[in-house]
Image (cartoon, grey):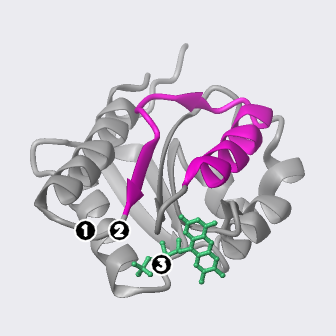
Amino acid sequence: MIEQREAADRTLLVVHHTPSPATRELLEAVLGGANDPDIDGVTVRAVPALGATVPDVLAADGYLFGTPANFGYMSGALKHFFDTVYYPCLDTVAGRPYGMWVHGNDDTAGAVSSVRRLVTGMGLTQVAADLEITGPVDAQVRERCYELGGTVAVTVAEQM
Ligand SMILES: Cc1cc2nc3c(=O)[nH]c(=O)nc-3n(C[C@H](O)[C@H](O)[C@H](O)COP(=O)(O)O)c2cc1C
């Protein structure tokens, strides 16, 4: 018999580095979208990048990664997360959906490509456009973050 998991079993893991009020606003908007009341059956777990573990990643059905741009790369905290989980999770997580957001003062390109290289290596499937935000957080930015969270959560909910 083929065992089918109930939609209520799904977990979306949000791994983030959130060192400032602006990045806190982004995280909260992403979580708002991921927890949209119209999306059923997904538990959203937000875990700081310095505390996220291999079991957290293995137990999740999809991922959101959030980081500031730091010296043209992802934050050291998110890099530490990937250093920790990359090899132990490599064979298990391939195909699972992910999305990401990056915030910077003026240039997020290097940070985005650094995350992209690792998620590509892990075989994750991009299900939402990378969200690159520079400068102040306004209503439009919050709306885009909300959409990102909702898009990835819906994809996780609909996985069989
Ligand atoms: C050590 C350090 C390095 C940074 N490097 C970059 C960078 O390469 N590109 C960029 O756009 N912003 C850079 N920033 C700005 C951060 O991305 C920004 O401070 C962060 O997203 C939080 O936004 P906020 O300062 O408006 O709260 C850097 C900030 C710090 C502290």
Q: Is residue 36 left or right of 114 when viewed as pictured?
A: left
Q: Circle 2: is it few (<14), some (14-19), or many (20+) Cα within 10 Å? A: many
Residue shown at the point (37%, 39%) measured from the top left: 152
Q: Range of the magenta residues?
A: 108-134
Q: Quadrant of residue 26?
A: bottom left
- Name the N-terminal-most of marks 1 and 2: 2
Residue in the foreground of this view, choosing between 1 and 13: 13
Mark 1 lies on a secondary structure that is loop
Q: Quadrant of the C terminus?
A: top left
Q: Hey, what amino acid is under mark 1?
A: Val
Instruction: In this rendered view, identify the residue nearer to me: 145 or 108.
Output: 108
Q: Which residue is mark 2?
A: 27
Ligand 1 picture quarter: bottom right
Q: Position of residue 58 (x, y in %)?
A: 67, 50
Give the label on residue 137, or none: 1
For marks 3 and 1, give the one nearer the viewer: 1
Q: Quadrant of the N terminus?
A: top right
Amino acid of disc 3: Thr
Q: Which of the two residues, 2 or 24, is positioned nearer the viewer here?
A: 24
What secondary structure is marked by label 3? loop
- Decide which of tag 3 and tag 1 comes sooner along the chain: 3
Q: Is mark 1 within 8 Å of ligand 1?
A: yes
Please tell me whether residue 78 is drawn above or below residue 122 in the rendered image.
below
Tell whether label 2 touches label 3 (CB within 8 Å). yes
Measure how far apart labels 1 and 2 are at the Cα level.
11 Å
Q: Residue at x 53, y 29 (%)?
A: 126
**Residue 114 point in image, percent of width and height:** 72, 49
- Residue position marked by numbered label 3 in the rendering: 18
- Point out residue 30 in the picture as x, y percentages from the top left corner: 30, 58
Would you place residue 5 above or below residue 134 in this image?
above
Q: Quadrant of residue 119?
A: top right
Secondary structure under badge 2?
helix
